[in-house]
Amino acid sequence: MPEEQMREFKGLVFLDLDGTIEDSRLDMAGSANAVRKNLGLPERDIESMFPFVMKGMDYLYRQCIPEALENPDMLPGAKSSDEEIILQKLAEMYHQEYSARIVENTKCYPGMMETLENLAGSFTLGLYTNKPEGLSRLLLEKLGILKHFSLIYGGDTLPESKPSALPLDTGIKAMAQGTTLKPDQIKAKCFMIGDSAGDIQAAATAKVKSIWAAYGYYEEQPDANPDFVAQQPSDIPELISRALKL
């Protein structure tokens, strides 16, 4: 961050992706069905897979395509029963299908496009998601909002993902580099916005403020109490301004 920008630093805002910026469940579950079809397996009810696309990619593969783990011979080119290798092969197949339909049904939540424009006008924006970084960047690009994000941490960017605070801490340190700002000064103006318990836990561990996206995938507020609750995306700028007393 150049010195002149540092003097005007107002805050760092991290957002989760799935269930916070957009709803991608139809395209994610549809991609799992496409992999099942490619493997000669019957397709499953789309909505029955929704709970499985909300907890990380390995969980998705295990729950949506468990037959491949039980019988790896059905995977093309698979020569091992090692679970890590099987999951990697499933990931390759899934990424190919998902990339092809990543915005077939996925749209930003109502008001989110305007909210991101609003936030980007005053704050530095970061993304912290458990979705792989490559797919996350592709989705942001297809939605037309990649331009707003200065920092992007996917589930495979660093050795740890949610509920770890490592990506938040890494982003905060990156913001401090080349400036006279200390990480604690940035933390005082840092927020994590998300719909899951992992988002709120990561914020608590990093000692930054959290905003729970009550409009997202999870209907019940996480046990790890968030600092603020957004009932809709348009609430977010006001909550941040209130917290920073702007």
Image (cartoon, rainbow, N blue to C red):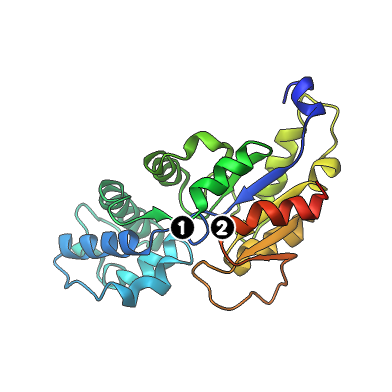
Name the outermost residue toward the left.
40
Q: Residues within 10 Å of mark 2 (few under 14, many from 20)?
A: many
Quadrant assignment, res 144: top left
Which residue occupies 30% across, 58% down?
A: 80
* Mark 2 or mark 1, earlier in chain: 1
Q: Which residue is mark 1?
A: 109
Which residue type carries mark 1?
Tyr
On screen, residue 10 versus residue 118, left or right, reads: right
Image marks 2 and 1: residues in contact by CB distance under 8 Å: yes
Which residue occupies 78% across, 55% down?
A: 242
x then y, percent, for residue 40: 13, 66
Which residue occupies 71% across, 67% down?
A: 226
On screen, residue 134 versus residue 95, left or right, reads: right
Q: Nearer the viewer, residue 58 or 100?
A: 100
Q: Which residue is mark 2?
A: 233
Identify the secondary structure beneath mark 2.
helix
x then y, percent, for residue 180: 86, 27
Which residue type carries mark 2?
Pro
Q: Nearer the viewer, residue 42 or 50?
A: 50
Q: Quadrant of the N terminus?
A: top right
Q: Nearer the viewer, residue 78 or 108?
A: 108
Which residue occupies 60% across, 53% down?
A: 160
On screen, residue 216 versus residue 47, left or right, reads: right
x then y, percent, for residue 202: 68, 59
Numbered circles on residues, count = 2
Quadrant assignment, res 161: bottom right
Q: Residues within 10 Å of mark 1 (few under 14, many from 20)?
A: some
x then y, percent, for residue 20: 53, 59
Measured Cα–Cα span from mark 2 to mark 1: 7 Å
The vertical placement of 241 against 19, above or below, is above
Identify the secondary structure beneath mark 1.
loop
Q: Which mark is residue 159?
A: none
